[in-house]
Every structure is written in C-alpha cells, then in structure tokens.
Amino acid sequence: STGLKRKKRIGEIKVLILGDTIPLYTTQMLKLLEQAQPFIKVPTSYVIKPHPTHQIHSSDYPSLNLRIVFDPLGEILNNFDITYSANLTSASIDAYLAGLPVVVILNQMELNFSPLRGQPDVRFVDTPEKLAEAFYMTQHQKVTMPDRNDFFFLDPELPRWRRLLSCIRSG
C-alpha cells in the first residue's frame, strides 16, 4: 500500500502536532515540546491541529511560535516532515499510513495505548532530550510504507460482522 508522496525538504523541519481529545494530554505534549527547545539544534516550525473539542491558544506557548490549523488531516499531511502526537491519538495512524515519521509522547505513569505501539519506525519519547533526538533522527529516517490491512479490516463482505450477527440471531 502506498501513502501520500511527500517531498524531502532540506533545512527547516515542519512538525505537525496532533492534538488529543483529552486537553491535559495536549497540554503535556506542548509543555514537553517547550522543554525540548534548548536541545533542538535544527530550524523547526510547529503547526498544531487541535482536536475539535479542545481549543488551543498559541499565546500560551510563546517559545513554540505555534500556528493553528483546522483543515482536514488528509489535505495537510503532505505539508509536513514529522508528526508529534499524544499516546491515544488515532490521527497518528493517518500520518503513519501517509508515510510520515511519527513521534509519540509517553507518560511514565500510564500504559502505552498508542495504536502504533509495536511499529518499529515509530519513536516514543518521555523526556525533552529524547524528543529533540527523535526530531533529529526522523529527519533522516526513511519510513517504510505500512500495509493498511495491518490496521484495518477492509473486507466489503464483512465476514466478522456477519459471523457475530448470525450468532446473536441463532442464540
């Protein structure tokens, strides 16, 4: 399966931040990113696509010079080099399937519930230093195009639903 074609850019790294449904998780992501700024040695720009239920104010994070976008994810992914998401954010699958490197924040006090857990080229971070390193490493990383069938059951015949519903009818 193939994702979106993206141009390899030289110079500035364009990071798309994928907001979470839980405001606290989005705040934690942005705070970790602020703490990582002294360790990020390449020019980097940040754009956040907040979850529709959570409002973000770029003025709350002045060191990031955040730009906020509300465009559909499928229309904007090709404009970025890396995505940065919370542990639970399912939008990270869209980015991954589009061929973008994905960096996921982990909270040391919680389990890793990321839908990308176990994918070898997804980076999970929990410190500012690891976040900066992940941005640097993913800049040079070639993403293997994953098979959509590893994430979705796309059989139009719906065999699993049919089997489940037949059990309910016969029971």
Image (spheres, helix red, strand yellow):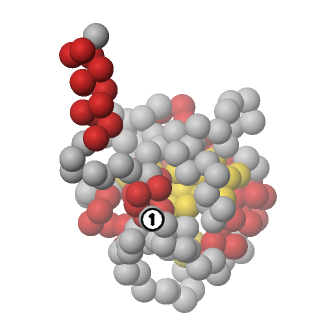
Q: Which of 65 and 29 lies nearest the eye of the viewer?
A: 29
On the image, the x and y values in percent for residue 61 come to 54, 49
Q: Residues within 10 Å of mark 1 (few under 14, many from 20)?
A: few
The picture quadrant where one finds residue 112 is: top right
Left or right, 98 with reference to 132: left
Left or right, 107 with reference to 86: right
For the point 55% across and 36% down, the residue is 25
On the image, the x and y values in percent for residue 59 come to 46, 48
The picture quadrant where one finds residue 122 is: bottom right
Residue 114 in the image: above or below residue 133? above
Q: What is the count of numbered marks? A: 1
For the point 64% across and 52% down, the residue is 118
Q: Is residue 97 visible?
A: yes
Q: At numbered mark 1, what does the secondary structure look like: helix, strand or loop?
A: loop
Residue 118 in the image: above or below residue 170? below
Quadrant of image for the C terminus: top left
